[in-house]
Image (tube, rainbow, N blue to C red):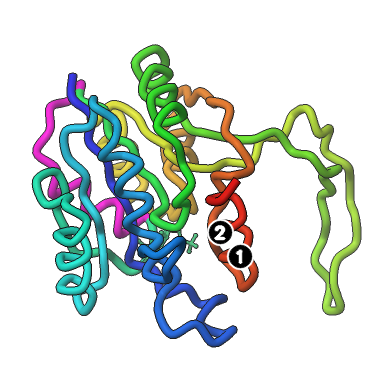
């Protein structure tokens, strides 16, 4: 069994761009190096990982090749073309992987740079046991179900907090499971915002491994400062 990693990094970071960021968020600097490189290094530091595929927009391939080389990661990292949305980027990378059915494929948002090696290893162990797993954190706030209205929302119910987990990444499965689930989603035109929704839809069991608030997704202005804080502490 080998472990392969896909890093979807082909987003344009709409929310950050609206706030004036010059680059998509995965290329912004955190502690002196691009966010994407932090994420890559976390996976490259796990001995079980054979190869990491980064999916980027065609116009960013050159820049990513240079950043990967500068970080000394050339040997284990391959840059491939991303897709129209996150699922499309993962599907492209999945098609480019040369792996066996029982190999493990992990998918990690490039914009979660503070993932740690121990959590990656625990996710791999959970996939070996259950066939598929994700990293998630318990909900801290009370969770409300709402109906959207023109000027906001009206509460329609309260979901018991103990039944809620907020999904992070990595998320993964054996290559055979992930490929079958993606093929079914593709055939039905289903589009999900993470791999688990695609796997669940195909009727597969997906385990949850405890994550941490540090592993948050850099999304909006202010998140970079928070990531800098976590990096220092
Ligand atoms: O859009 P969101 O912030 O959820 O993006 C999560 C990850 O998916 C990011 O790393 C982003 O670069 C990636 N993505 C992608 N291809 C797209 C859109 C997003 O690889 N077309």
Q: Position of residue 78 (x, y in %)?
A: 14, 52
Q: Using a 10 Å C-alpha cutoff, classify the residue at mark 2 as few (fewer than 14 neighbours), some (14 to 19) or many (20 or more).
A: some
Residues at marks 2 and 1 touching, judged by CB atoms closer than 8 Å = yes
Q: In the rendered view, would you say 60 is above or below 26?
A: below
Corner quadrant of residue 10? bottom left
Q: Position of residue 197 (x, y in %)?
A: 49, 41
Corner quadrant of residue 65? bottom left
Q: Viewer-proximal residue, 124 or 164?
A: 124
Residue 43 among those drawn in magenta:
no
Q: Viewer-proximal residue, 189 or 165?
A: 165
Corner quadrant of residue 217? bottom right
Q: Viewer-proximal residue, 200 or 196?
A: 196
SS under mark 2: helix
Q: Position of residue 47 (x, y in %)?
A: 24, 27
Q: Residue at x 36, y 47 (%)?
A: 185
Q: Residue at x 86, y 66 (%)?
A: 153
Q: Which residue does the numbered mark 2 point to in the structure image? A: 228
Q: Residue at x 61, y 55 (%)?
A: 229
Q: Residue at x 84, y 32 (%)?
A: 160
Q: Which residues are magenta?
A: 87-102
Q: Is residue 56 left or right of residue 141?
A: left
Q: Which residue does the numbered mark 1 point to in the structure image? A: 225
């Amino acid at each position: 069994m080998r472990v392969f990693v896909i890093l979807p990094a082909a987003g344009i970071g709409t929310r950050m761009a609206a706030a004036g960021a010059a680059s998509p968020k995965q290329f912004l600097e955190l502690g002196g190096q691009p966010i994407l490189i932090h994420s890559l290094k976390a996976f490259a530091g796990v001995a079980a990982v054979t190869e990491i595929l980064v999916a980027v927009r065609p116009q960013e391939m050159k820049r990513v090749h240079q950043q990967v080389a500068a970080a000394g990661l050339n040997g284990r990292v391959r840059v491939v073309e991303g897709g129209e949305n996150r699922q499309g980027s993962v599907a492209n990378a999945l098609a480019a992987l040369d792996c066996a059915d029982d190999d493990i494929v992990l998918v990690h948002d490039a914009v979660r740079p503070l993932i740690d090696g121990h959590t990656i290893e625990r996710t791999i162990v959970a996939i070996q046991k259950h066939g598929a797993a994700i990293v998630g954190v318990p909900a801290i706030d009370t969770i409300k179900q709402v109906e959207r209205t023109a000027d906001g929302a009206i509460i329609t119910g309260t979901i018991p907090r103990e039944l809620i987990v907020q999904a992070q990444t990595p998320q993964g499965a054996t290559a055979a499971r992930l490929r079958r689930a993606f093929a079914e989603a593709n055939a039905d035109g289903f589009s999900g915002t993470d791999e688990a929704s695609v796997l669940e839809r195909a009727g597969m069991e997906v385990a949850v491994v405890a994550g941490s608030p540090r592993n948050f997704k850099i999304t909006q202005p202010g998140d970079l400062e928070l990531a800098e804080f976590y990096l220092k502490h």
